[in-house]
Amino acid sequence: MPTRSDEPRVIRMWASLERPLPEPSWPEGVTVRTFQAGDAEAVHALLDDAYTWDDSYAPRAHDEWLRWMTAHDEFDPELWLLTERDGALVGCALHWRPVDGRGWLKDLAVAAPERGRGLGAALVHAGFRASTERGARVVGLKVASHNPTGALVLYERAGFVADSWVDEP
């Protein structure tokens, strides 16, 4: 079992889906739906904004990002969950299609004004349910240990457990 460190690291985590899964609890006024092709620019912008805290994050040109994300073998638009408030994108959870019982949460982003209201947890729980419906028994992700958004605590509360740590350059 990895031990915590004060050094910045990338943590790989897994959550078992073979347990009672909580229902997503959506904040009032937020709607949820799946990805449509016309959402790509807004999703990309939300992700770029969400990762501004990370000095090592290198934004990609939109066309390159879209091609890489949607041409991926595990891309499934039904597993890209988007949340809106008053018609504006405020959160997303981009899951890959499960392979051999293993799903993957590629990206989770919540707009700064929406953080701390349960939206991230609701997106994670909805993604668990959608992944389970497609045969996943576990879902994995990677998170930076020094992410200031509260992501690590969110993932631990959702049942993710670290299985490896990688030192960052």
Image: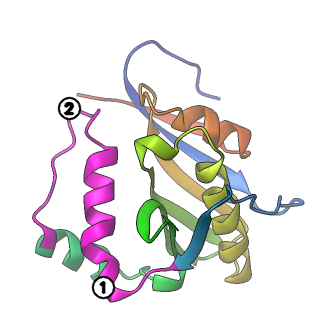
168 vs 145, left or right, is left
Residue 22, horizontal then vertical, whole percent = 83, 58
**63 lies left or right of 98:** left
> Along the line of sight, which residue is nearer the eye, 37 or 19?
37
Q: Is residue 48 left or right of residue 76?
A: left
Q: Which quadrant is the C terminus positioned in?
A: top left
Question: Where is 42 relative to 169, above or below?
Answer: below
Query: In the structure shown, which secondary structural element does the residue marked by tag 1 occupy?
Result: helix
Give the residue pinned by disc 2: 55
In which image quadrant can residue 116 be found?
Answer: top right
Q: Residues within 10 Å of mark 2 (few under 14, many from 20)?
A: few
Q: Residue furthest bottom?
A: 37
Residue at 83% x, 61% y: name it.
Answer: 21
Q: Pointers 2 and 1 in contact (CB under 8 A)?
A: no
- For the image, the number of numbered tags is 2
How many C-alpha atoms fall within 10 Å of the one at disc 1: few (<14), some, or many (≥20)? few
For badge 1, the amino acid type reads: Gly
Identify the residue at horizontal 28%, vertical 48% (top origin).
49
Residue range of the region highlighted in magenta in the rendering? 34-62
User: What's the CA distance linking mark 2 and mark 1?
Assistant: 29 Å
Residue farthest right in this picture: 20
Residue hosting label 1:
38
| Residue 100 lies within the magenta run | no
